[in-house]
Amino acid sequence: MKHVLWIEDEATFDLNRLAAAVNVTFKYKLTIAKTVTDAVRHMTSGTEYEVVVVDMRLLPGEDPRWKRLQDTNDRVLLGMELVYSLLAAERGRVTLDPAERPQWLGPQRFAIFTVEPEKELSDFLDVVGIDRRFYRRKKASLEQTTLLDLIEMVIAYRAGVLNPNGRQG
Amino acid sequence: MIPPLTEQWAATYLEVLAGVLVFALGVAALIIQLALPAYLHTLATRRGLWRRYTLSVTAIVGVVLVYVWALHPISDAPLTGLPALLGHALLSGALIAIVWMTVGYVRQVDSTRLVQSLVDECDVDLHRDSSFDDTLDSLIDIGGHAKAGFEKDRVISAMRQLADLVLDKYELTYDGTTLKPLLFGLETVLVHGSMHGSRENFREAAGVIKHIMDRLPEAYRDSSDMADLLSVTTALTIVVMEQFPMDGRLPATYMDILDAAPDETSDLEMFRVGITALNTSQRSHYAYEFSVRALLALLPAEGTLTGTEGNGAELLGLMAHLWFHNEGTRQLIENLLAVLEGRLTASAIDSAIGFHFSTTNFDTVDLLKRARPNWEHIAERTAL
């Protein structure tokens, strides 16, 4: 089974049906991180994640570096800061140890799933190099398979079976 | 002036003395009984607070009586002047002192102060022995007997404080086992005391467990404390599923902790979580979601399933329960069997049957035996 990391504080609450749709396929081992601290811990646990789906609004968790960042700026988007620190360290406001940035990390494994509109994230997406096709906006009426589709799309793209229109085949 | 001591006078006087003492202590005891829960009074007695209180009250009554003895009029004539004034002042003062001491005792035994004093004593124990002593048992006793809600929360918060003490102040002497009594104590406070915890208490406890997990130093990620933490979390997951079946968030919170753990939960415990979730399916909208999460947690990453403990026995057991639960869950297992293509063998099913027999899960043995022909058929179809 391919490992997928979903960094989302509401993953097992309000958005649990999206996780369930992934789980019942038994194709992916979906790990959920509810805070930035948990996310970094999972990424450095030795597991190589095929896809990392990130929400922009995250809680810091116990790591004082993320806590401090939130304390000094309550409007900071910790998900965005995490991705900056992982993929564009020069823009990151939290400096990660080299051990906290595993070898397998790369923008082609990332997808963004958040309430922020795409235009507000365009600079960010450009800087970190995440393809805009792997951005999904959270809204009230989400398809049950939104997360599953996003995961499969990233995997298909990396396997080279996704055409430029974002369709498989 | 000392009154002349006659046998009759002394007998009368001693009778009065005994009456006054019994009255003073009796009224105080009645107030305490009404104002304090019995377990707190018992705890205070054990910790010597009650003895200190009774000795003090007895001493005050004694002083008053000695004064009265000394000034007792020889004739029937009443006392006048300064001695009478002093007598009034002493009697009133004694009464005020007894009331003040009773209130003080009640406040001292009030669980907030008692809990804080126990935390302080635990700090001393940790400083002296690098481990918890009987003082922690007293705190756990209070928590177990405390009413659900605010009273239990107070103890749970104190336990969080103690965990922080171990991991911060006494970090250098921490050896990966110190938190054991605290972790199991948390379970006692919520489940094994005379009062069960409320939904909010379980939520608070989940926060404490996650806090401890996050704070455990990197070197102790696979320590005995981490194993105990997972064991307690699993036990509480099962309890919340059974106790609050309509609440999807609470079991999810506990399962999230198990998922976030750097070490893996024991497969047998995860099997129990899955079975419990399934058993609550009539009462809970979330039961199947938790069963699927348990199933995924039991799925070994790669390699052939041997059906032995920790490598498929528990997974196959849970699959058997789901297979016979309803059509939907059977469809789910069919999907899983397709994913397991090439990894499941007949001997693995036999091993799993043997495992569940030896652990007295006879229902699971029965279900596995009944499912085997179907599974073998599906396995053959998917190229086994």
Image (cartoon, coloured by chain):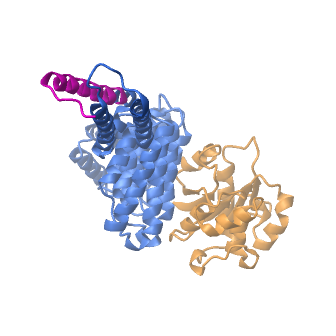
Chain colours: A orange, B blue
Quarter of the image with the C terminus of chain A in it = bottom right
Where is residue B141? Give x, y as percent.
34, 43
Where is residue B142? Give x, y as percent.
38, 42
Residue pictured at 73% horizontal, 74% vertical: A92
Range of the magenta residues? B1-28
Residue that protrudes farthest toward the top in the picture = B76
Q: Is residue A72 left or right of residue B204?
A: right
- Where residue B163 sits, quadrant-wise, is bottom left
Between A80 and B344, the residue placed more toward the observer is A80
Give yes or no for residue B14 being in the magenta stretch.
yes
Residue pictured at 39% horizontal, 66% vertical: B222
Residue that protrudes farthest toward the left in the picture = B7
Residue pictured at 19% horizontal, 29% vertical: B4
Residue that protrudes farthest toward the right in the picture = A119
Between B173 and B102, the residue placed more toward the observer is B102
Residue B339 visible here = no
Name the chief secondary structure element in magenta: helix
Between B13 and B143, the residue placed more toward the observer is B13
Q: Is residue B157 above or below residue A2?
A: above
Q: Is residue A41 left or right of residue B89?
A: right
Give yes or no for residue B48 being in the magenta stretch.
no
Q: Is residue A91 left or right of residue B168?
A: right
Q: How many marks?
A: 0
Where is residue A143? Give x, y as percent.
71, 43
Q: Is residue B271 left or right of residue A2?
A: left
Residue pictured at 42% horizontal, 34% vertical: B82
Where is residue A131? Give x, y as percent.
77, 66
Between B6 and B223, the residue placed more toward the observer is B6
